Amino acid sequence: MHKGLIVTEAGKKSGLGHVQRCLSIVQAFEEKSILIEMIVVGDSSIKQLKINSIITILNNWKNAIATIKKISPDLQFLIIDSYKITSKQLEELKTLNIEICILDDNQRLDYINSVIINGTVDAEKFTYDNSNDLLLGSKYIPLRKAFWKRSENLTAMQIEKILITFGGSDTRGLSVQISNWVALNYPNTTVSVLATNAFETTQLKALKDNKNIELILNPNDEAIKKAMKNADIAVSAGGQTLYELACLGIPAVAIKVIENQSNNIKGWEDFGFIKNVGNWNDKQLLTNLKNCIDEMESSEVRKQQAMIGKKHVDGQGARRIVKHILKNENIILN
């Protein structure tokens, strides 16, 4: 019997962040010996992820809705993580008489009678309809299993290792430009870059040919965690990765690569965990980046950033989400 289904989106253009956070929820269900299947609306780039879960890849939401309807008699709950599903499609799913949980970042739709999961830092300030069951704030940000356990790490006196990470597909193609610039302007540092086969071919070749950087290609979750822990600071996009860095206490410089990252970046900047470079296409991008990194030269500044990040993200968000859903549905564990 299917107990639950997660539906999300991914692709070279939209990135892989939504899939990653959904997989963390799958892992938390697996910890309870509950099988969760996933539907991903997107393209074949998802196949490059090392995934053990049962995943169906569909090319549009119309097909996804049809599939959900077909298996709905076996479902107790449905989790949706989407920037594309329409209000009309969501209302269509509400007729199936199953609990619907929404992973939301920015109040994209006027949700009603749903479980709303918004792990954005400071999401407690968001206003949702009173009919919803609300799980708000960074205590509910779902992180991959590798980040459920963390250890103390000391703040180095000087910045010696810089990590560059723009997600599983680097939709803006920033990895080459930023890593080249960092290696040139901070020659006494080791520059590491996370990349996958979902990157554009020309970008991957440029990264492989660059002898001034350490390329970490197609890392699994533990390797990603290790690369983060080894870094003194990270230059990152403004999405899910910021929460993983916060969990480990790795000070970050954030670049907004898509509009839906605005709340993440503003929240973390207000709290003091990140330095905000600005938009990916800002004409002053590299100047802003240098200013941000230079502000972090002080070990005291970085130590404070690390403390703030770890205070707000403990890595247990996926477990909290699962505990709440199981309680709501009175699911009996086998």
Image (cartoon, grey):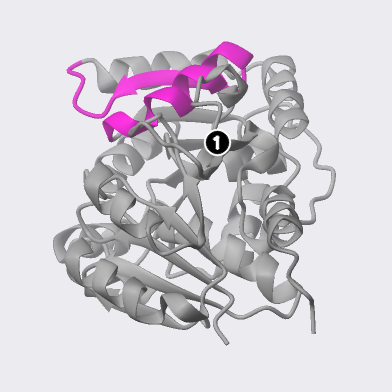
The quarter in which the N terminus is drawn is bottom right
Most foreground residue, 130 or 127:
130
Q: Is residue 194 visible?
A: no
Most foreground residue, 127 or 17:
127
Residue shown at 38% from the left, 20% from the top? 277
Residue 276 belongs to magenta span: yes
Residue 186 falls left or right of residue 10: right
The quarter in which the C terminus is drawn is bottom right
Q: Is residue 112 visible?
A: yes
| Residue matched to label 1 | 132
Residue shown at 62% from the left, 15% from the top? 271
Residue 189 falls left or right of residue 276: right
Q: Quadrant of residue 181?
A: top left
Q: Which residues are magenta?
A: 258-283
* Image x and y of residue 238, in percent: 42, 34
Residue 117 belongs to magenta span: no
Is 238 drawn above or below residue 56 in the view shown?
Answer: above
Is 50 drawn above or below residue 234 in the view shown?
Answer: below
* Image x and y of residue 88, in percent: 23, 47
* Image x and y of residue 100, in percent: 49, 54
Residue shown at 33% from the left, 80% from the top? 70
For the residue labelled by badge 1, is the local secondary structure a helix, a strand or a loop?
loop
Q: Amino acid at mark 1?
A: Asn
Is 328 drawn above or below residue 302 in the view shown?
Answer: below
Mark 1 closeness class: few <14, some 14–19, many ≥20 residues within 10 Å: some
Q: Quadrant of residue 255?
A: top left
Most foreground residue, 256 or 20:
20
